[in-house]
Image (cartoon, rainbow, N blue to C red):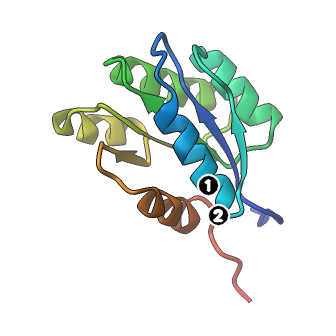
């Protein structure tokens, strides 16, 4: 596996019918301010659109913001589509209104991390920097 050069590329997406995107925009800005390239997809994206964007943009991670309660379905579909497209190397993380009881099942399906309300932008930036790209060994 080759080590990517340049900044980490992250797609931030709002899948489903949820129209509240302030949190997603705050995270996108924090990641961008930390030196990452961020592609924000906007509201009402389908899982197919999110995965297509991530592959087209050569993203290393997808951050999903889900406040609608459809997190189990939407995360699972994104993971499934990445597998179908042979793109399982794209790290999927997310946040929103996600009950603690649902987090273990999401992680079992392949979601790398879930951030719940109260997570700081600094902790999310730090996690992405530590988990999305393995540092090059010199």
Name the quarter where the N terminus is drawn.
bottom right
Residue appearing at x 30%, y 43% in the figure: 116
Residue 104 on image: x %, y %: 25, 41
For the question of whether residue 91 can be seen, the reply is no
Front residue of 43/136: it is 43
Residue appearing at x 47%, y 32% in the figure: 65
Name the quarter where the C terminus is drawn.
bottom right
Instruction: Give left or right: position of 99 versus 119.
Output: left
Residue 16 on image: x %, y %: 49, 14
Residue appearing at x 81%, y 38% in the figure: 57
Displayed quadrant of residue 35: bottom right
Residue under label 2, please give it. 34
- Counting labels gives 2
Numbered disc 2: secondary structure = loop
Residue 66 on image: x %, y %: 42, 27
Q: Work out whether 49 lies above or below 6.
A: above
Numbered disc 1: secondary structure = helix
Displayed quadrant of residue 75: top left
User: Do the CB atoms of the residues marked 1 and 2 lie less than 8 Å apart?
Assistant: yes
Q: Work out whether 138 lies above or below 110.
A: below
Instruction: Give left or right: position of 40 versus 112.
Output: right
Q: Residues within 10 Å of mark 1 (few under 14, many from 20)?
A: many
Q: Spot the residue most to the left.
A: 101
Residue under label 1, please give it. 31
Q: Residues within 10 Å of mark 2 (few under 14, many from 20)?
A: some
């Amino acid at each position: 596996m080759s080590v990517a050069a340049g900044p980490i590329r992250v797609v931030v997406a709002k899948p489903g019918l949820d129209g509240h995107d302030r949190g997603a925009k705050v995270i996108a800005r924090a990641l961008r301010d930390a030196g990452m390239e961020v592609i924000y997809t906007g509201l009402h994206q389908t899982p197919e659109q999110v995965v297509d964007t991530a592959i087209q943009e050569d993203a290393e991670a997808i951050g999903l913001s889900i406040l609608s309660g459809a997190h189990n379905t939407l995360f699972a579909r994104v993971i499934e589509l990445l597998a179908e497209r042979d793109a399982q190397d794209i790290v999927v993380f997310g946040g929103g209104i996600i009950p603690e009881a649902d987090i273990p099942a999401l992680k079992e399906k392949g979601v790398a991390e879930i951030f719940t309300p109260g997570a700081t932008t600094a902790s999310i930036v730090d996690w992405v920097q530590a988990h999305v790209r393995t540092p090059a060994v010199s």
